[in-house]
Image (cartoon, rainbow, N blue to C red):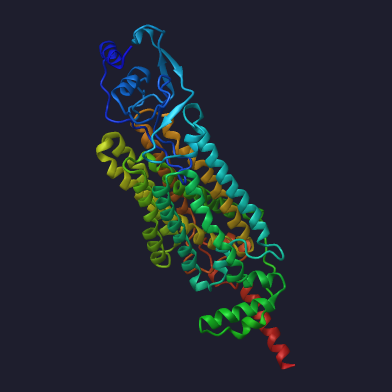
Amino acid sequence: MSRQEIYKDVKRTMPRTRRKGLRARRSSRQNGSYLEIDTKCKLPQLENDTYEIRSDYQRHLVNITIPDSEDEAIEYDRCHYYIYPYGESPSKQNATKVTCTEWVYDKSVITKSFASEMHLVCQDTLLTSHAQMIFYFGVLVGDLLFGILADTQNVHTFRVKGSGLEMVGPSKRNWAGIVIHMFFAVGLVYLAGMGYFLRDWQHVGLSIAAPCVLFLCYWWIIPESPRWLISRGRPEEAVKILKKVALTNKANVPEKLLRIQDEPDNHGNLWHLFSSKVLFVRTMIIFLNWAVVSLMYYGVTMNVGNMGGDFYLNFFLLALIEFPAYSICIYLVDKIGRKKLHCGCMLLGGFACASTIFTVLFGGKSLEPLTLTLAIIGKLGASGAFCVIYVFSAELYPTVVRNAGMGASSCIARIGGMLAPYVAKSGELVDGRFGKALPLVIFGAASVFAGLMCLLLPETLNQRLPETIEDGNKFGRGNDYNDSTTIVEKYTKQKEKQLVSSESL
């Protein structure tokens, strides 16, 4: 049978009109490795089948072979195709639907992804979320492993961010902690550029891994933390570093700082955070916010492919919005307080994401720019909340358990990251427009709930921070806590008295 005869036969037996193009929903995955790109079953009649329709013959083979999708957002069924009895004209009456074993992919967005190479589609599509979950589980293990190594003897600064915070004074610590987050945004902008120009998951992976080699020079550039050196009985090295820092900043090191060469043993255990009702409730609220912030921050980015428009432009805009988010936080964190700022960021981002249900359900494609705008506002709130929660929770934890509390909070955040890919993919469980809006609605609802729970936490701005577990119980409860003398103040006065006594001798 010639192509012309097939064309006439198909036109007679199975007339249908197709919508323009072959578009399926896309789900963003970190660096494009797990990007679920448009696909359809490979036509068994064509040995060199492609996703793009290149001839009328191929077009009408698709029409008689590939079923319509039950989801209005997807052009064709990606998991099944029709076969017909040999020698009979194709028709709906003699068609048998079978499951695909091979696929062809749209290479206009990305030429090669891990998902397309491994054929993680149809019944295997959830494996992309599993892969993302394993990635964040690796981050969790790394946090635990290197967190332990960073506090051991003879191991040089593993956690550069922590070291950076310890290399600045208290007055600049909040500023330094927030500025560090801007470099996360720099990395995302870089990733968007590499993804756009390379379009191959392996090449993109190499492009973001190669710069890590430069961090080897940090061994010689970044000094060790003076606090860590003092805690390890190496005060001479700590003083040497402090003098070098003072010389660079054209400042003098206070004499009493050079004299006091050890610190009181103020270390506590994580379980102390659950030793009273007050600390238990506050710790649970802090943990909740770390998990939700991480869930929303990563989840909104993973959901970028469902927002319509250009994938790379959307990803770039979601990365770019982090710069104003961090700039606003730098300006407001010491003006309106940590509590108000964090709650505001959580509620802003949450309501923006939840509002996308209206633009998706009632506007559809015509309101895709507004949906994207709301998602960008959601990312703005999540980014701001992510940097403020570092400052806020560190000040809420009593000094004796601050390191343990922050470490536990970081681990809880990784759990939120592990859940993010599953929530981002939840829309595929629901057909129609609501499925497209579902992930952002979940992110938004979780953010609003966590933000409201923060109202139960005390403000830490311009407050004497808790040093002991007892201080933590009293902090923010309307008593005379700020008038009491802290353990550190007592310790410092005791050391000064000892120094005066020794000098008089």
**Up/down of 96 relative to 416, above or below:** above
Residue 113 shows in this picture = yes
Residue placed most toward the observer, 205 or 313: 205
Residue placed most toward the observer, 478 or 436: 436
Residue placed most toward the observer, 496 or 433: 433
Occupied quadrant, residue 466: bottom right
The residue located at (63%, 73%) in the rendering is 226
Q: Could you tell me residue 480's position as x and y percent?
A: 54, 68
Q: Could you tell me residue 495's position as x and y percent?
A: 68, 80
**Up/down of 80 relative to 136, above or below:** above
Residue placed most toward the observer, 8 or 30: 8
**Up/down of 68 relative to 323, above or below:** above
**Quarter of the N terminus within the rendering:** top left
The residue located at (28%, 23%) in the rendering is 56
Occupied quadrant, residue 156: bottom right
Residue 292 shows in this picture = no
